[in-house]
Image (cartoon, grey):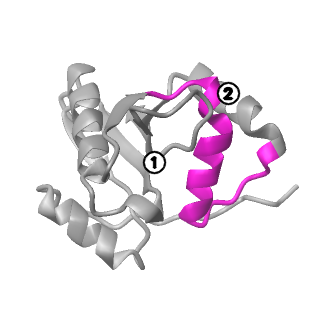
């Protein structure tokens, strides 16, 4: 990458870019309520780390983001940290941004007492699975889901 990048805490000013990046994973959301949704997410104690070009001006496109969740559980000595969405803009993949986001996430979650870190990834994203395995993650379980989205 010709520009260097930094990983930092996401903030409300990043909401539109975070929504753009989430759409790259197939999670399109209405742009109109991006700030409201991000504010609610952050107010619940969740976190977003973003990767931005060092030379970029405020409001410039982000090159990546990761959403983090900490879940207290009874069956571990500490909570489980989860990377629930790891996104790198397609135009800059393969340049170390994903590795930097995961490393920053691990440091963040371990500092907060997490006993284990999990990454959620869609079953069809086999390239992402190989990436996570290359970082030392192993498949440990199945996750089953039942959606209530769109139901009133």
- Distance from Cα at disc 2 to Cα at disc 1: 23 Å
Query: 104 or 59, which lies in front?
Result: 59
Count numbered badges in the picture: 2
Residue 84 in view (yes/no): yes
Corner quadrant of residue 32: top right
Q: Which residue is mark 1?
A: 63
Magenta span of residues: 9-31
**Which mark is first along the chain, 1 or 2?**
2
Task: Tell which tag, 2 or 1, sits nearer the viewer.
Answer: 1
Task: Inspect the magenta stretch and tell me whether residue 11 lies in it.
Answer: yes
Corner quadrant of residue 122: bottom left
Vertical comparison of 132 with 115: above or below: below
Answer yes or no: do the residues labelled 2 and 1 have beta carbons within 8 Å?
Answer: no
Corner quadrant of residue 44: top right
Residue 115, x across and y down, in percent: 19, 33
Q: Which residue is mark 2?
A: 40
Vertical comparison of 81 with 126: above or below: above
Residue 84, x across and y down, in percent: 44, 49
| 55 sits to left or right of 30 | left
């Amino acid at each position: 990458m010709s520009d260097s990048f930094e990983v930092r805490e996401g903030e409300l000013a990043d909401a539109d870019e975070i929504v753009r990046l989430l759409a790259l994973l197939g999670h399109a959301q209405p742009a109109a309520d991006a700030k409201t949704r991000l504010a609610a997410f952050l107010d619940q104690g969740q976190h977003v780390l973003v990767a931005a070009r060092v030379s970029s001006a405020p409001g410039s496109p982000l090159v990546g983001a990761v959403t983090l969740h900490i879940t207290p559980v009874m069956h571990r000595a500490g909570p489980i940290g989860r990377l629930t969405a790891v996104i790198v803009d397609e135009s800059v993949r393969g340049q170390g941004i994903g590795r930097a986001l995961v490393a920053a996430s691990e440091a963040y979650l371990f500092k907060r007492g997490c006993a284990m870190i999990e990454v959620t990834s869609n079953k069809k994203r086999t390239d992402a699975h190989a990436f996570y395995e290359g970082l030392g993650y192993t498949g440990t379980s199945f996750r089953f889901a039942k959606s209530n989205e769109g139901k009133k």
